Amino acid sequence: QVQLVESGGGLVQAGGSLRLSCAASGGTFSDYVMGWFRQAPGKEREFVVSINWSGDVRNYAPSKKGRFTISRDNAKKMVYLEMNSLKPEDTAVYYCAAKVTGSYKYSSWGQGTQVTVSS
């Protein structure tokens, strides 16, 4: 099973950008669909975006397409989330997750990285 560690969160002003990174270890990275989720205070965790093993299929939550971009580097076992034009409502803990291609559930989760967008 793959282990995941996120980094890159922080405090940014509205309109700014951040790039989150997720480092994977263990497992065969290319076997996994990688996803980003987020959880805002007092809210349930929500899906943001996923990317397939080869990087050519991306699925975005409808409200996230256009400002958020996911990418992956299988050689480095990394997945990234580029976030632009950030809004205060993007404030949340962002989680990296992995699921074996063809599986329904994400089986591996990182510990999360805090993103705070100030107005």
Image: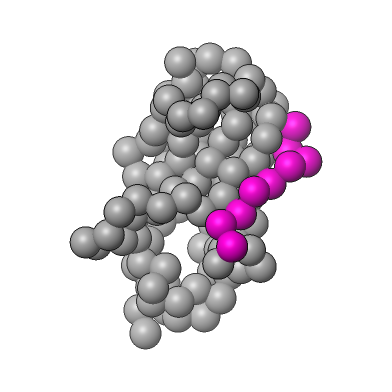
| The stretch drawn in magenta includes residue 61 | yes
Is residue 60 a member of the stretch shown in magenta? yes
Which of 63 and 112 lies nearest the eye of the viewer?
A: 63
Give the quadrant of residue 116: bottom left
Decide if residue 118 is in sight here.
yes
Q: Quadrant of the N terminus?
A: top left
Q: Where is residue 73 shown, x and y percent of the image?
A: 68, 35
Horizontally, residue 110 falls left or right of residue 100, namely left
Query: Compared to 4, does 50 lie above or below?
Result: below
Whole-percent x, y for residue 2 in the image: 47, 21
Judging depth in this view, the residue of 23 and 62 nearest the camera is 62
Residue 98 image position (x, y, % from top left)? 50, 30
**Magenta span: chief secondary structure:** loop
Q: How many marks?
A: 0
Q: Quadrant of residue 110?
A: top left
Question: What stretch of residues is rendered in magenta?
Answer: 54-62
What residue do we see at 35% from left, 51% from top?
A: 45
* Residue shown at 56% from the left, 76% from the top: 85
Residue at far front of view: 104
Question: From what the image shows, is residue 16 above or below residue 29?
Answer: below
Q: Farthest left residue? A: 42
